[in-house]
Structure formats: C-alpha cells, structure tokens
Image: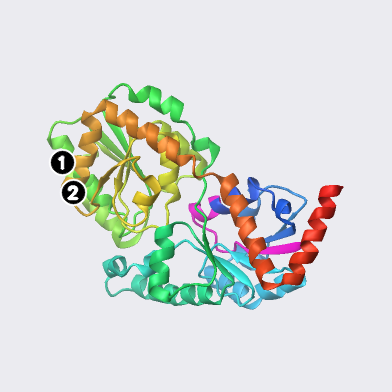
C-alpha cells in the first residue's frame, strides 16, 4: 500500500510560496519515502513551472484563475471532495490559512505577522489589522486541527506555540535556495576592490515591518558623510508602507541621484541583481525565515541585517547586525562594511558557507519524510503495508 499526497497550492501567489513548491517538487523524489502519487491543485502559471514526473498529477480548476473570492470558495467547498476522489491519504498545504476542512492534514506556517503583537500594532485601526486578526484565527484553527505542522525556524515554532499552545506534532524544515543564486566565487572576486559608488541592494516588497524608509535615510546619512554609495530597492508594494517610502525618497533624494526603485521582478531576475551589487541590506522586523535573506547569503554578498526575529538564527555570524528602527544603527552597520575590505570579504564568505545548510534537496527530503511519517503515525496498518510495498520495489 502506497501513500497518496494532496497539495493545496491554490493560494501560493507570493515569490517565496511559489519557490517553495517548485523547490520541493523539483529536487526530491517522494517515491523514495513510499509515496506513489502527489496531486497538486493550483493555477496554470504555477503548474507550468512544476516538473513533469510520473508521480505528479497537476489539477487546474477554473476557479483558481479567477478572483480571491472564487479561490476561497473553491478551497472551502470543493477541495475536500477532490482529495477524496483521488484517494489522498493526507492534505499538505503550505498556507496555514487554508479553509479546507479535509483531515488529516499537515500545514506549513509561513506567516509570523499575525503572531507578533508589536508588529500588528504598526497597522493601527485599519482593514489591514482586521485582516491580520482574521488570519490569525484561521491559522490557529488550521494548526490545532492538523495532524502535523511545519515551521521554517525554531524561532517561529517557539513564538507561535507560546501564543496558541503546544502542538502535538511539528517539524522545523527551512526553505531551500536555488543553484542560480550560488555565485559566491564571482562575487568574492569583485569584493577585493571597493567599487565606487558602492551598490547596496534591498529586495522586498514595501510593508510596515520592512522599514525601507529607514534604509533610505541611512544611505542618505552616509552620503552626507562623504561616502559614495547607492541603493537599489526591488519589490514594489502598496498602501501606507509604499507611501512612506516614496515620501522619504522625496525628502532624502529628491533628484533620484542615488536611490533607485524597481517594482516586482521575476524570481529568476533576482540573481542578476545580487551579482551586480556590493552589499545586501535586509531591514525586516518580522519574518518566519526569509527566503530573500537566504538567497543573498548564497550569492556571497556581505550582509547588513536586522537583529529581529529569526534572522540571527538564519544568518548567525555571517553578517553585521542593526536595529531596523534606528537609522544611525543601520548606517553604522553599512559603514563598517564600507570601511573594512577584509570584513566585507569575510562576511561574504561566511554567509555563503552558512547558506549550504539551506538546499531544496534537503527541504524536499525532510518534507516528504515528515508527511509520510505523519500518515504512518495515524494508521499503523498503513505503515506495515507501505513498508512491504517499498521492500518489494527495492527487491525489483
């Protein structure tokens, strides 16, 4: 008897969520864990990026090409029926905000914002704050009902369980990073010389907890001290955070001489931006892990990083830290990297080494293993029959 996995990727719209699904399906073989079929439900653009494999079945319900309301209704009303139709043993959803009632399930927690009260207060009394409160309720319900939960970092596992109580079964499985980002050799060869202007890069959409406006102020302060430095902001955004960013750019660099902004760019374009930069800045104060940070580590760039949340757990001693709400702290961290060539190179090399802990091969292997073990924990007879089937395959 073999295990059949169903994956709900109907709402994998962000770059990180898309990269995660592509990574675990493209770099690990579920059949090695006694999994015979993996059914994925998603929208066509994402399905087209997934590998073609004998064990992978792709489903594209028309509702997933429509509005968020259509997507949510399909997830609530029809997904469970589809899972039963294809005899799925368990549902894996990489979004703990799923409203599908199918059980057993394993959910992945990728959103810490709803569980960080300090961060939620940044949104004041607003529809965005109300959405976060609703999301917290849905996520908490999903994790408590699930047979297993996957967290991206130890920090995330600890904070969430402090808020909702201890979960009976969970695993910490970080994101991986694609090989296209591993370009440390080329980057390190360039770091031996201080390029003027020194190019700083921050890749992230504008959000209240990303603090791009403080980074703009910090770069402006360095320019006033005589440093030749520029800043490229990639990621776009919307709402109050984007307005705050644009207002700060207008004050600090009204002629747009050293701050450049780009909106959303395709994921495959990010390695090029990293390769053309000298320092990576990451100023978020709320993350589950941050795939963007890991990608920068893999590129071999020296990193000036926020000291909040799980970021020190991820970057460890591979970067220079700062307080993301203190402009002087940010500018001081970047200044250290500007002034010390040996430090730039040492930090770049160290972060590249640390990034080796994060691979899609490892992430995929641990994810499939956890899913299979969760199914086995619920049905001992299934475990016995599955082991017989795997042993038979190995003999063949």
Image position of 150 with respect to 321: above or below: below
Residue at the image position 63 percent from the left and 45 percent from the top: 27
Question: In this picture, which residue range is highlighted in magenta?
Answer: 1-19
Image position of 351 with respect to 292: above or below: above
Mark 1 and mark 2 in contact (Cβ < 8 Å)? Answer: yes
Look at the image and tell me in which quarter the N terminus lies. bottom right
Q: Which of the two residues, 353 or 211, is positioned nearer the viewer here? A: 353
C-alpha gap between disc 2 and disc 1: 9 Å
Residue 55: which quarter of the image?
Answer: bottom right
Residue that label 2 marks: 327
Q: Which mark is residue 221?
A: 1
Residue 150 point in image, percent of width and height: 53, 62
- Label 1 packing within 10 angstroms: few (<14), some (14-19), many (20+): some
Q: Is residue 278 visible?
A: no
Closer to the N terminus: mark 2 or mark 1? 1
- Label 2 packing within 10 angstroms: few (<14), some (14-19), many (20+): many
Q: Which of the two residues, 14 or 112, is positioned nearer the viewer here? A: 112
Residue 112 point in image, percent of width and height: 40, 64
Residue at the image position 49 percent from the left and 43 percent from the top: 357
Residue at the image position 67 percent from the left and 67 percent from the top: 375
User: What kind of element bears circle 2?
Assistant: helix
């Amino acid at each position: 008897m073999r295990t059949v996995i169903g994956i709900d990727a109907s709402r994998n719209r962000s770059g990180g969520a898309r990269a995660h699904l592509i990574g675990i399906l493209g770099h690990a073989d579920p059949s090695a864990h006694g999994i015979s079929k993996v059914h994925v439900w998603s929208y066509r653009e994402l399905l087209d990026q997934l590998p073609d494999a004998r064990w992978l079945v792709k489903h594209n319900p028309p509702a997933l090409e429509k509005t968020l309301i259509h997507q949510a209704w399909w997830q609530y009303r029809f997904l469970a029926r589809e899972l039963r139709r294809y005899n799925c043993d368990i549902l894996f959803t990489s979004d703990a905000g799923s409203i599908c009632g199918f059980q057993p399930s394993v959910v992945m927690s990728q959103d810490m914002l709803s569980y960080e009260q300090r961060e939620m207060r940044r949104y004041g009394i607003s529809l965005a704050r109300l959405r976060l409160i609703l999301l917290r309720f849905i996520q908490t319900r999903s994790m408590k009902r699930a047979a297993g939960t996957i967290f991206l970092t130890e920090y995330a596992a600890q904070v969430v369980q402090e808020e909702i109580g201890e979960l009976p079964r969970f695993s910490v499985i970080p994101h991986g990073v694609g090989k296209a980002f591993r370009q440390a050799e080329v980057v390190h060869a360039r770091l031996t010389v201080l390029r003027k202007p020194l190019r700083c890069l921050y890749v992230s959409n504008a959000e209240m907890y990303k603090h791009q406006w403080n980074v703009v102020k910090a770069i402006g302060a360095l320019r006033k001290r005589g440093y030749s430095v520029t800043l490229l902001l990639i990621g776009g955004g919307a709402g109050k955070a984007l307005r705050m960013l644009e207002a700060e750019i207008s004050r600090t660099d009204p002629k747009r001489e050293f701050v450049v902004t780009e909106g959303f760019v395709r994921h495959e374009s990010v390695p090029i931006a990293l390769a053309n930069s000298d320092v990576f800045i990451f100023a978020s104060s709320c993350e589950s892990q941050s795939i963007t940070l890991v990608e920068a580590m893999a590129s071999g760039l020296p990193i000036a990083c926020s000291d909040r949340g799980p970021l020190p757990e991820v970057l460890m001693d591979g970067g220079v830290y700062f307080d993301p709400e203190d402009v002087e702290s940010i500018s001081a961290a970047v200044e250290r990297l500007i002034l010390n060539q040996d430090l730039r190179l040492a930090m770049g090399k160290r972060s590249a080494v640390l990034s080796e802990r994060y691979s899609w091969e490892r992430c995929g292997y641990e994810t499939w293993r956890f899913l299979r073990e969760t199914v086995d924990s619920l049905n001992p007879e299934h475990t016995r029959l599955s082991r017989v089937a795997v042993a038979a395959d190995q003999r063949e």
